[in-house]
Amino acid sequence: MGKERIEKVFKEKLANREKLFVPYIMAGDGGLDILQERIQFLEDSGVSAIELGIPFSDPVADGPTIQKAGLRSLKEGTTLKGVLEKLKEFKEETTVPIIIMTYINLVFRYGLEKFAEDARVAGVDGVIIPDVPMEEEDLVTEYLKRNDIAFIRLVALTSSEDRIKEIARRSEGFLYAVSVMGTTGSRKTHEEQVEDYLKKLKEYSSVPVLAGFGISSVEQARKLSAHCDGVIVGSRIVDLFHEGKEEEVKALIQGSIQKLEPSHQE
């Protein structure tokens, strides 16, 4: 469990010449009762880890699709505490790493130390808090470290060279490369500079680099992961689950993580 599980699972998949695929789902979208079933489905489909969003009333990093999913989840009465309690119920059956994506307000309200302890007990391996800048991350990293939970850092296209280097140096679990300027959501194209940016991150980072934000097709996933270790896909997966299109979710995952031939490796 914890940071080591992320490292172990990712290392095995990369050694097996598989690109990493991390889906994002909103906890409580459709009710918390289906959470175990959904996590098991994703695990069976071959994902590398699961990013589990916690609904929040002011989700600054999320586009329209995930905002709507968050509102649906809030209407179901989903809370951070409720998600951790639900995860704890079936943590022994879960082998895929679980990454919680939440906002600092919710963690503060919960209590920093208690959140980290309860997350560990629930089997959480990593945490993403997009509204905590590098300069303020000491607020939470001490407690996460004590509980062996990876603090997953995001790095942006607009970050300076020095900042990119420092974020890469601090990274745990994996480095989340934001591959668009803006919020999450499906897009038809990516900026041309993304390829150079991902290659640069690979040079600086000692942990796997995953590209996220705006990826909605197998073609986009393969194109981006050619320059890094894999992708994170959120809005498209949230939409497909909401529409009951599980087979399309599986096809997106398995098409994106198709094993590479040695000659195709970067």
Image (cartoon, rainbow, N blue to C red):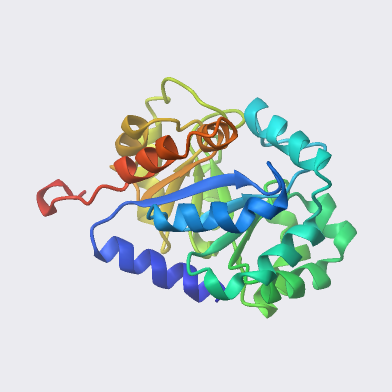
Q: Indicate the position of residue 246 as horizontal and vertical percent values.
A: 47, 39
Quadrant where the N terminus is found in the figure: bottom right
Q: Is residue 143 above or below residue 189?
A: below
Residue at image point 39% right, 52% down:
45
Q: Answer left or right for 246 relative to 141.
A: left
Q: Quadrant of residue 256?
A: top left
**Can I make out residue 48 in this image?**
no
Residue 53 in view of the camera: yes
The residue positioned farthest toward the left in the image shown = 263
The structure residue drawn at horizontal position 56% and vertical position 55%, both measured from the top left corner, is 37
Seen as rendered, the residue at the extreme top is 188
Picture coordinates of residue 239, whole percent (x, y): 56, 31
- Residue 187 image point, x, y percent: 48, 23
Within the image, what quadrant is residue 128 found in? Answer: bottom right
Say if 216 sits above or below 162 in the image.
above
Q: Would you say 188 lies left or right of 115 here?
A: left
Residue placed farthest to the right in the image? Answer: 109
- Residue pictured at 79% horizontal, 52% vertical: 104
Identify the residue at horizontal 41%, vertical 21% (top origin). 189
Compared across the picture, whether 50 is left or right of 71 comes to: left
The total number of labels drawn is 0
Which residue in the rendered view is the most extreme toward the bottom? 146
